Image (cartoon, rainbow, N blue to C red):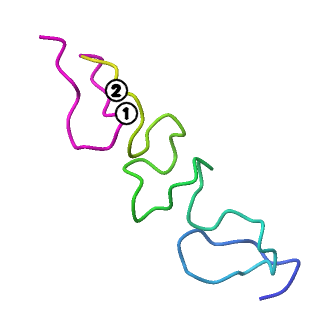
Amino acid sequence: MNPGAVEIAYDGVDNDCNALTYEDDLDRDDFGVDADCADMDPGRWPGNDEICDDGVDQDCDSADLSCA
């Protein structure tokens, strides 16, 4: 660990000695990898508004909302 080190995502260590580096929330949507169903997609997080029948689970409930 040192200020010049590369931050390694999800390893639980502050490799670059910078508390502001996103270590477990790579899409910066304020949901860490433990809660976020798609940590590389800022449009998908728990509680997000779901768009029906688009094939995407925006609210992380494991299913796309049906418009029917």
Left or right: 67 as drawn, with respect to 3: left
Q: CA distance from mark 2 to mark 1?
A: 5 Å
Mark 2 vs 1: CB contact within 8 A: yes
Residue at the (88%, 80%) spot, across then down: 3
* Image position, residue 64 (x, y; %): 23, 29
Question: Residue pushed farthest left?
Answer: 68
Q: Amino acid at mark 2?
A: Glu
Residue at the (19%, 12%) spot, across then down: 67
Q: Which mark is residue 58?
A: 1
In the image, residue 68 sits, relative to residue 58, either above or below, namely above
Part of the protein shown in magenta? 53-68
Left or right: 46 as drawn, with respect to 17: left
Left or right: 1 as drawn, with respect to 29: right
In the image, residue 34 sits, relative to residue 44, either above or below, namely below
Quarter residue 62 falls in: top left
Judging by the rendered image, the residue that carries numbered circle 2 is 50
Residue at the (70%, 81%) spot, across then down: 14
Quick one: quadrant of the C terminus? top left
